[in-house]
Amino acid sequence: MTSPATVYTPVIRSNIHTLPQFKALRTDLQHTILTVSAVFPFRTNRYVADLIDWQHVPNDPLYQLTFPQRGMLSSEDFAAVHRLIRRNASAAELQPVVNEIRMRHNPHPAGQLTYNVPHLNGEPLPGLQHKYRETVLFFPSRGQTCHAYCSYCFRWAQFIGDQDLRFAAKDSSGLTAYLRHHPEVTDVLITGGDPAVMKTRFLRDYIEPLLAPELAHVQSIRIGTKALAYWPQRFVTDDDADDLLRLFEEVNASGRHLAIMAHFSHPREMSTPVAQQAIRRLRDVGCEIRMQAPLIRYVNDDPQAWATMWRRGVGMGMIPYYMFVSRDTGPKNYFEVPLGESARIFRQAYNQVSGLARTVRGPVMSATPGKVLINGMTQIEGQRAFVLTFLQARDPDWVGRPFFAHYDPEATWLFDLKPAFGASASLFDPDTTYAAAS
Ligand SMILES: *Cc1c(COP(=O)(O)O)cnc(C)c1O
Ligand code: SF4
């Protein structure tokens, strides 16, 4: 095929004809891509394209991961957009149709960057989120894009320019001022998009101030990234890859922990020599790599995929962390997996790996009241029920207490569930829980 990619070049809707595999695709699949990507953001790159088994598209899981699919739009929406594209309609004609469809696909699930924004001296601090006592989330403005876009991304609105990026932080001065007043915070999680898209010198400007002696309570700096899957060259051959590793090494040498929260969706993403080299280089400078991803229909709705991923990951020194339930946004109907099925997939994967891989927790919903773990299903007094617990909650007192919901095979999110066996209804209600806990 093509020679291994070494210079990062995004493949988006307007230059997709430069991708050799696109030119070789069936015409109906080409049409699908051009139609659906007019609505939902699309971005991939040659490295990701080379991970795809093109003999098996559209079913190949890595094709499903970044390429637009026919089922992501209803037949009416698809037909409406397709008709406009076929007759080369102007942007002015296309825009209102596309916007109307986007608005019907919940572009802003759970407020995202606007909820839980902390204040200092009465002023809101953009780019910060403080929901759970120990951990502050930090959204640097330069890290709000990704090397490729997952088709299920809950931040998709920001990739089409809809989300107001003034909610991201230009520098870390607000963060460090806030942390000086919050000695209870042990973890800063730098997230995006993907902070690893940033040049090292910018990332250094954000991270270095966190190493100040008066911030000794900040013990762990986490970086949430999909770059090990979408552009591992970032840690190996990019111009400033060595500088990046030096920066991480400095953090670890300062007595803090630099943790990589690596988004891996499928075992094939860790199969290439460059991905394995990237993992090794990060480990060599003292980084721990924790693996997490949402469970997505057609991408990884298969216990074998997860078990293989955890096994191989552990073999490379990584730590399985979370299996998430995907959020209610974008083409959700296409990729959602009901909670009951998710719990079965998790258990069938979990029960075939060794204890070293059983650090993983899931399926987990990151919902308004907190991170809710589906422990599994059980029968109580003749009724089927979900057993749930909070792994994180706005109110730390909720953490670790089991509660119940009636089993519902169709439910795909916490708010679809009905409380059972004495569980408080407020735990399931997005509005009352938000009010009760904020
Ligand atoms: C998941 C998450 C965290 C980190 O939680 P851990 O259980 O420590 O990984 C922090 N803040 C928010 C808003 C989160 O969703
Ligand atoms: S890596 Fe994360 S933020 Fe980036 S497109 Fe995928 S899900 Fe979205």
Image (cartoon, rainbow, N blue to C red):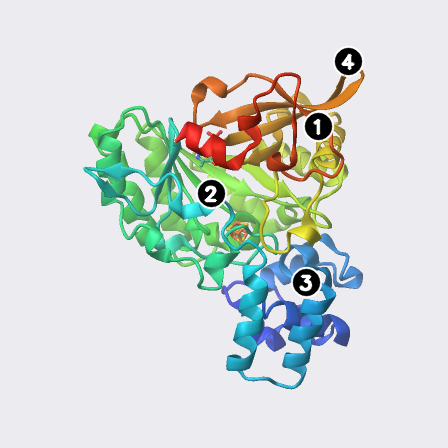
Residue 91, image x, y percentages:
52, 80
In this rendering, the answer to whether 296 lies above or below 290 is below
Q: Name the residue tied to disc 2.
A: 224
* Quarter residue 5 falls in: bottom right
User: Do tag 3 and tag 2 residues touch (Cβ < 8 Å)?
Assistant: no
Amino acid on which disc 3 is placed: Leu
In this rendering, the answer to whether 405 lies above or below 212 is above
User: Do tag 4 and tag 1 residues touch (Cβ < 8 Å)?
Assistant: no
Checking the image for residue 73, the label placed there is 3
Q: Name the residue tied to disc 4.
A: 381
Checking the image for residue 350, the label placed there is 1
User: Are there few (<14), some (14-19), or many (20+) residues within 10 Å of tag 4?
Assistant: few
Label 3 or label 4, whichever comes before in sequence order:
3
Amino acid on which disc 1 is placed: Tyr
Residue 335, image x, y percentages:
68, 50
- Cα distance, mark 4 to mark 1? 27 Å
